[in-house]
Image (cartoon, helix red, strand yellow):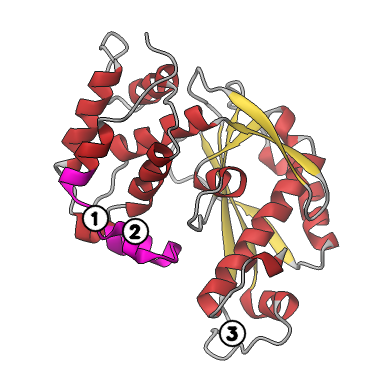
């Protein structure tokens, strides 16, 4: 699995290690029948199963139906034993909530130097802090927005397993929701913009009903509001008029190999490509 990456430096290797561990985690969750109740979505799903050419840090999941009593901890034992069976020494811990939320979070952590020596036995580990941890965040939405559509995909490594995940149109809806609604504060998440361009370049059609549900749940629009394709384009263009694209580029650069692909980013660029947005289901 690690041979796929052709890593050139420590940062490349660190990202490769994280991604291989992500896939082993997916395998462990599949073995535990987690995907009977949940689906994989977000940037990492887009990278592993749809070919997004940037690294993504977190593993994001959504339940198929609302269940505020969902117990993610019940999956930890089999998940940890699966990860350990590949020689990985990691801990999995649930994150305590500081405020009420439908999102459950957990962290998988392992010693960075130990993982480097396992994955890259000949690697020079100078420059890695002895206390550094490889850390992967896992989040589960226990109150999923309606109208998502799914598919099942298969992976052969580390061993054959299956994953239920959002299809491309529903992933696109989630990404557009992030572009419109994410609270970026002082750090604009250029990764959202990079993924948006990826979807448009692949001619992905938007799951419009699912996007409306997300916008309603966020309080961005009311259920009575119109949410046509043209309305969505106006929301996006308004957002693009507010973005500092130099800051957005700085956010995404550590996650991509060819930074020349974002040289063109500007309000005019994003407004122009948004005219090509299509949906697979209008109201």
- What residue is shown at x 53% (from left), y 52% (from top)? 58
Q: Dot 2: few (<14), some (14–19), or many (≥20) neighbours within 10 Å?
A: few
Provide residue 19's location: percent of width, then percent of height.
62, 59
Q: Is residue 263 magenta?
A: yes
* Residue 72 occupies quadrant: top right
Residue placed under numbered mark 2 in the picture: 261
- Provide the secondary structure element on which disc 1 rests: loop
Q: Which dot, 3 or 2, sits closer to the camera?
A: 2
Residue placed under numbered mark 3 in the picture: 130
- For the residues labelled 3 and 2, the Cα–Cα distance comes to 35 Å
Residue placed under numbered mark 1 in the picture: 264
- What residue is shown at x 43% (from left), y 33% (from top)? 203
Marks 2 and 1 close (CB-CB < 8 Å) = yes
Q: Dot 3: few (<14), some (14–19), or many (≥20) neighbours within 10 Å?
A: few
Is residue 270 something one can see in this rendering?
yes
- Provide the secondary structure element on which disc 3 rests: loop
Provide residue 239's location: percent of width, then percent of height.
20, 38
* Residue 208 occupies quadrant: top left
């Amino acid at each position: 699995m690690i041979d796929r990456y052709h890593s050139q430096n420590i940062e490349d290797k660190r990202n490769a290690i994280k991604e291989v561990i992500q896939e082993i985690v997916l395998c462990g969750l599949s073995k535990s029948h987690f995907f009977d109740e949940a689906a994989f979505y977000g940037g990492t799903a887009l990278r592993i199963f749809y070919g997004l050419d940037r690294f993504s840090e977190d593993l994001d999941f959504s339940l198929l139906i609302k269940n505020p009593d969902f117990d993610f901890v019940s999956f930890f034992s089999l998940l940890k034993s699966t990860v350990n069976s590949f020689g990985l020494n990691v801990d999995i811990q649930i994150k305590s909530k500081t405020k009420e939320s439908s999102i459950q979070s957990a962290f998988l952590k392992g010693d960075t130097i130990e993982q480097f020596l396992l994955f890259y036995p000949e690697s020079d580990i100078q420059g890695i802090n002895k206390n550094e941890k490889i850390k992967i965040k896992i989040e589960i939405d226990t109150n999923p927005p309606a109208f998502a559509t799914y598919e099942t995909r298969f992976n052969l490594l580390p061993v054959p397993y299956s994953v239920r995940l959002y299809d491309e149109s529903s992933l696109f809806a989630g990404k557009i929701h992030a572009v419109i609604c994410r609270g970026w504060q002082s750090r604009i998440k250029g990764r959202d913009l990079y993924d948006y361009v990826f979807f448009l370049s692949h001619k992905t059609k938007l799951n419009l009903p699912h996007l409306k549900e997300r916008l309603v749940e966020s309080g961005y629009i009311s259920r009575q509001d119109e949410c046509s394709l043209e309305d969505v384009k106006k929301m996006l263009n308004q957002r693009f008029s507010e973005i500092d694209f130099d800051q957005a580029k700085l956010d995404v650069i550590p996650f991509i190999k060819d930074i020349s692909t974002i040289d063109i980013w500007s309000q005019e660029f994003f407004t122009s490509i948004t005219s090509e947005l299509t949906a697979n289901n209008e109201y």
